[in-house]
Image (cartoon, rainbow, N blue to C red):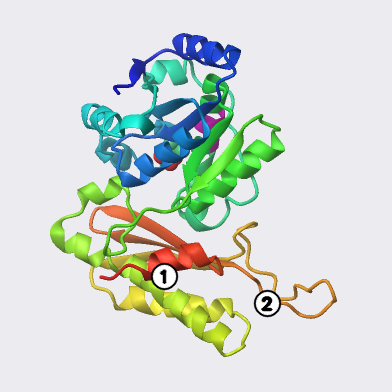
């Protein structure tokens, strides 16, 4: 089924209002286009839990910290619409493709800032990025008024920023997280992968390899009855990235997945005993050729660990 292309907020609101009047659940999958299997998995999940699925395609200039990155961001509306139509029963009913003036009708006076959770990871190296994301996501949620919105776990910090945004502003929407979709060689699907030359694509293996190493070390520690040491995991992942040719590390961080802060080593169990963190986010970012790639795994989340360990270079 080919989705209806909607370009104005007025038409979008009318279609949404009609759906709600008929007690149909509205689902939103926000994207910047150049759709890949990761996005399509988000759309499949949205179509499982809602009756009217809206996929937004908008390359949001306010979340790019570099003009050349915005310029080079891949755009392929026809390809995107064909990929969505090929989803068959899971295809969205609406593709929302607003012009810039529809999203930013005038010089913006309002910026949505999520002040916690954004000082580390990508927030530290991409100034203003999460203000741009939080602002446009707030706008998209206001435009579509969905019951549910789906985001990928690959952008883990973005996911947590949006969860906190929704919680703190009491936005009436449920946020669902879709698992990271990986190529067979482990590289996480990303629109930016399209810009990698063959040798750079090979170099990109270092990111999932570093995460696999962290998971393997964590499993060894657990099997030996030792508590998880964030520094050990960080060291294991860093060593792999440092040894890789054509990879320039941006960060390797091991954090509490909920707070995105360093894990609290003094955490106590209910009985007051010392407790090691149950789950740790291992997140990496690196420049490979012309692009900056990110990836992560939540150590202690069996599904996330298994999906990563099932891949090979
Ligand atoms: O993840 C993305 O593609 C973007 O950050 C989003 C959520 C669509 C906001 O522009």
Q: Is residue 63 above or below residue 99?
A: below
Estimate the x, y position of residue 55 in percent, counting from the top left.
Answer: 41, 29
Q: Residues within 10 Å of mark 2 (few under 14, many from 20)?
A: some
Point out the quarter of the image occupied by ligand 1: top left
Residue depicted at x 27% and y 36%? 71
Q: Nearer the viewer, residue 161 or 64?
A: 161
Q: Residue at the bottom extreme?
A: 224
Total number of numbered labels? 2
Q: Is residue 134 left or right of residue 179?
A: right
The answer to whether residue 149 is magenta is no
Magenta stretch, residue numbers? 134-138
Q: Is residue 179 left or right of residue 84?
A: right
> Does residue 103 appear in this view?
yes
Sequence-wise, which precedes: disc 2 or disc 1? 1
Residue depicted at x 39% and y 19%? 98
Q: Is residue 249 above or below residue 225?
A: above
Q: Which mark is residue 276?
A: 2
Compute the Cα span from label 2 to label 1. Answer: 20 Å
Residue depicted at x 30% and y 38%? 35
Estimate the x, y position of residue 219 in percent, counting from the top left.
Answer: 51, 80
Estimate the x, y position of residue 239 in percent, counting from the top left.
Answer: 38, 79
Q: Quarter of the image containing the N terminus?
A: top left
Q: Which residue is mark 1?
A: 211
Q: Residues within 10 Å of mark 1 (few under 14, many from 20)?
A: many
Q: Nearer the viewer, residue 56 or 109?
A: 56
């Amino acid at each position: 089924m080919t989705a209806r292309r909607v370009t104005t907020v007025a038409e979008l609101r009318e279609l949404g209002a009609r759906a709600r009047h008929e007690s149909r659940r509205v689902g939103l999958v926000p994207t910047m286009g150049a759709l890949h299997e990761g996005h399509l998995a988000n759309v499949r999940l949205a179509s499982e839990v809602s009756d009217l699925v809206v996929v937004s395609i908008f390359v949001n200039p306010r979340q790019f910290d570099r003009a050349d990155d915005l310029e080079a961001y891949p755009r392929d509306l026809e390809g995107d619409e064909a990929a969505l139509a090929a989803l068959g029963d899971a295809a969205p009913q609406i593709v929302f493709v607003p012009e810039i003036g529809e999203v930013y009708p005038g010089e913006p006076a309002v910026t949505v800032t999520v002040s916690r959770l954004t000082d580390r990871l990508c927030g530290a190296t991409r100034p203003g990025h999460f203000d741009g994301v939080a602002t446009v996501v707030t706008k998209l949620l206001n435009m579509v008024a969905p019951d549910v919105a789906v985001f990928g776990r690959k952008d883990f910090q973005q996911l947590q920023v949006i969860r906190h945004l929704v919680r703190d502003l009491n936005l009436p929407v449920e946020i669902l997280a879709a698992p990271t979709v990986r190529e067979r060689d482990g590289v996480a699907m990303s629109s930016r992968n399209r810009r990698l030359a063959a040798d750079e694509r090979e170099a990109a293996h270092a990111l999932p390899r570093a995460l696999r190493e962290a998971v393997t070390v964590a499993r060894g520690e657990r099997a030996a009855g030792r508590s998880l040491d964030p520094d050990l995991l960080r060291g294991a992942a860093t060593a792999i990235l440092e040894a890789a040719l054509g990879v320039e590390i941006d960060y390797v961080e091991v954090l509490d997945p909920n707070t995105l802060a360093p894990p609290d080593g003094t955490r106590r169990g209910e009985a007051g005993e010392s407790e090691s963190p149950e789950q740790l986010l291992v997140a990496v970012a690196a420049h490979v050729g012309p692009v900056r790639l990110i990836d992560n795994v939540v150590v202690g989340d069996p599904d996330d660990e298994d999906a990563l360990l099932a891949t090979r270079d």
